[in-house]
Image (tube, rainbow, N blue to C red):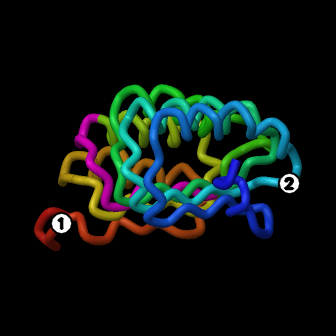
Amino acid sequence: MPILNHIINKTLCLKSYTLSIGHCNAIADSLHYFEGQLNRIVLDNCGVDDGEFCSMLNGIYKLDGFKRLIYRRNTFQDKSLAILQNIVLKKIPNHLEELRIEQCFTEPNVIRSLLQSITKRCVIKKLGLVDARLNHNIVEKHICELVLRSSFLEELDISQNQLTLIDL
């Protein structure tokens, strides 16, 4: 599969590479062959919808030692949320260290649910929720709680959420 030629230094990096449900299912089905050889995926502007991302996340969930997921300019909704919640709850040493959801089509309630899961087991070191439709309530209740509870969190990027200093 030509997509797998994009794995370099344990990273599958797809930028502006349009993926279909067939591609996503094939990637999910083949990920177990890369156990120990793949620990990071970057999907940037691949036209991935919620069902397609859900399919890929099912494959990622089965990987031990998967550490970084960067998902940018695609769709993130309820179907993929359910699987991603299971991924962020994995225990050390198979935990996710970096998660970036950036400029995706999403809803505040989806981000809120994701943050609740992350806060349950605060082992993520780097979290990016760029242009993720964060609002005052989400920041006040969930981001603040995450920052207070986590001894692992080293980097938090909530830029481009149109929050004002009055909101914070």
Report the mark closest to the observer, 2 or 1.
Answer: 2
Residue type at numbered disc 2: Gln
Disc 1 crowd rating (10 Å Cα; few below 14, some 14-19, many 20+) is some
Residue 19: in magenta span: no
State which quadrant residue 3 falls in. Answer: bottom right
Judged from this view, the residue extending furthest toward the front is 2
**In the figure, is residue 1 to the left or right of 137?**
right
State which quadrant residue 60 falls in. Answer: top right
Tell me the SS state at disc 1: loop
- In the drawing, what numbered circle is on residue 163? 1
Residue 93 visible? The answer is no
Judged from this view, the residue extending furthest toward the right is 36
**In the figure, is residue 88 to the left or right of 63?**
left
* Residue lying at 88% horizontally and 49% vertically, measured from the top left: 36
Residue 22 visible? The answer is yes
State the quadrant of the C terminus: bottom left
Residue type at numbered disc 1: Leu
